[in-house]
Image (spheres, rainbow, N blue to C red):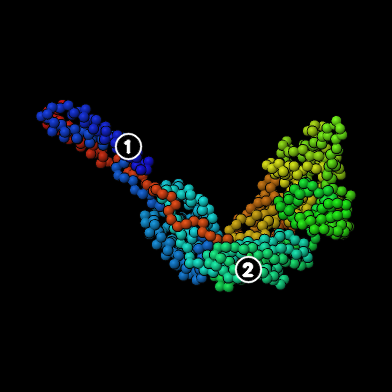
Amino acid sequence: MPINDVTVVIRWILALALGVAAAWLAYGRVGTLARSRALLLGALRALAVTLVAAILFGAPSAPPRPAPPLVAIDVSASSRRAVGDENSVVKVWRERLADAVRRDAPGADAFVTVGDSIRDITAADISTLRSDDQGSRVRVAVDRAASLGRPLVLLTDGEVDDAEALAEAPAGSMVRVLANAPRTDGAIADLAVPVNATAGDTITVAATIIAGASATPDAQLRVLLDGLPPVQLPVPALGALTSTRVTGTLALPRGARTAIVRSVLLVPGDAEPRNDTLSSVIEIGDRPSAVFVSTAPDLDVREALVVLRGALNVPTRAFLRVAPGVWRVEGTLAPISEDEVKAQAGAAGMLVVHGDTAWRPRATPRSATGAKALWIPAPPTAIARAGEVARTPEWYASGVPASPLAAALAVLPLDSLPPLTLAGPARGGIAVLTAQLGKRGEPVPAIAARTENGVRTIVVSGSGYAGWALRGGRSAEAFGALWGAIFDWLAAARGDVRAARPITALLRAGEPVAWRRGGADSVVAVRLSRRGASATPDNGSAIDTLTLRFTGASFETMSPALAAGVYDVQAEGGASVLVVNPSREWVPRAPTVRDGVRSRGALSSDAPRLADAGWPFVLALLLLCGEWIGRRAGGYR
């Protein structure tokens, strides 16, 4: 029995007990001859006292009624995927919604639509609904139902983004899945393409292909790059809701430019064309963005490359000297000649030399304008002799002097960073980071920076920086902040002079746009021009202007989602391209919720209280008056 019902019963039992006790005290000891009259008067007394006590205890005058449900209708675009004739399907979908409301929520008086947001509607609006939202989020409906004290009735196609939220739905909630009949549908779920590459390189393109609720036959994937002949890749037959990864190579043309890689899936009998194409942007440079050369590879090199390639997403080639005159390509460990290493290092937009800083790349006209980092590791610790204890001198980061990188490094937790081993003071520039031996003595530069004739150079002294990353927590964040700031300053935001540019090469409608700034300005204005769009009375102009705000020292920010299309982005310092693909709602996926009741029990509306009505007071007064008249007629005082 629910707690509310138990409380109601207890209140009425207490009120009845008081009424019986009052009647017994008044008429329980009368004689035999007057017992019949005493029973009638005692009944009147008991009823009157019971009614008054029930009013005082807040007892209800009627049982509670079930609370009407909140009906949430999923209007995400996935309900229109692979349906053929959309007009007829939309009509049938509306009829099924109305039938489900009549069957599962007959007393409903509150309706909302959910998808990428929640909106209030009326029952009459169901006949005009369309499923166009770019998301399927239901938590807001769960929270709304809980705040109203009502069960939730969710009408959906079964593909919900946050299905786990339904576990918190109020008692009595249910889900009704209105799924479409399965049809043949193959889709491109993901496309992995490098964000940056060098002209003339061969890149690897990987696409994830998924089948809908019905199996698909053998298919073909075509990969196209602006004006080049397509690369055709076979796609095997897939079972329902299964996926495969298709990989191929693509040779890049010469010349620096921003290109669009487009993948097109050709499936015989495919019912949904909106998920057969996926595009990504790749920026092709005429020279490597960064070259990392180490003549003494160690953990520092590995962790610095993680920041350079991962956090900053800079295309980087790394070469390691593993023995005198023996060079290897980092990653694959393929052999490479030193002449080739010097040639690539000389053409790099940013060069990092770790180890022997006397090592020089092959001189080229461009090598004089590229940014450089000279990293001098600490020498090996001397071997202790008999009776001696060898201790590595421990240097601790102690300060961030005024420098071009000071703003980005001001947040470093200097007091909690592991020690370093310096190779002497970093000379030849402005101190960026200082260190003290054993946290005592005069601070010396551990990292210095300088700019000569427009060329930026960083000098790094010592080893042990990887210890920051390996410790994890705030130390790992400090490692990323330090080397991220160094590489950003060296390469002027990856060799990019644009004030802001989009980060994500593969973006879908309904997803916010991530931006990265390339300068020091915290407020950047960008202009978006959608290709093929023209001015209309609705939008007024085919060009939109966004104001991006970067908080504090952050290099990234977000802006609202955009409609599908190709956008030319213009910011101070240069242009970029942004491709917005159709929403993920068009990509098939397995249902995340099942049809049926989500939680047992039922929510009830508040029962009416006796104190809120007038008749209980009148009835109690009449009972007391009747008892008084009976007492006078029987000779009682």
In the figure, is residue 601 to the left or right of 487?
Answer: left
Q: Residue 617: horizontal and vertical position, in percent?
A: 26, 38
Where disc 1 sits, the SS reads: helix
Q: Residue 573: horizontal and vertical position, in percent?
A: 74, 57
Q: Which tag is nearer the camera, tag 2 or tag 1?
A: 2
Where disc 2 sits, the SS reads: strand
Q: Which residue is mark 1?
A: 10
Mark sitting on residue 320: none
Mark 2 near mark 1, Cβ–Cβ under 8 Å?
A: no
Q: Residue 140: horizontal and vertical position, in percent?
A: 50, 51
In the figure, is residue 33 to the left or right of 399?
Answer: left
The image shows residue 330, relative to residue 127, as above or below, that is above
Q: Is residue 298 visible?
A: yes
- To which quarter of the image does residue 45 belong? top left
Residue at 49% across, 59% down: 158
Q: Which residue is mark 2?
A: 235
Report the number of discs: 2
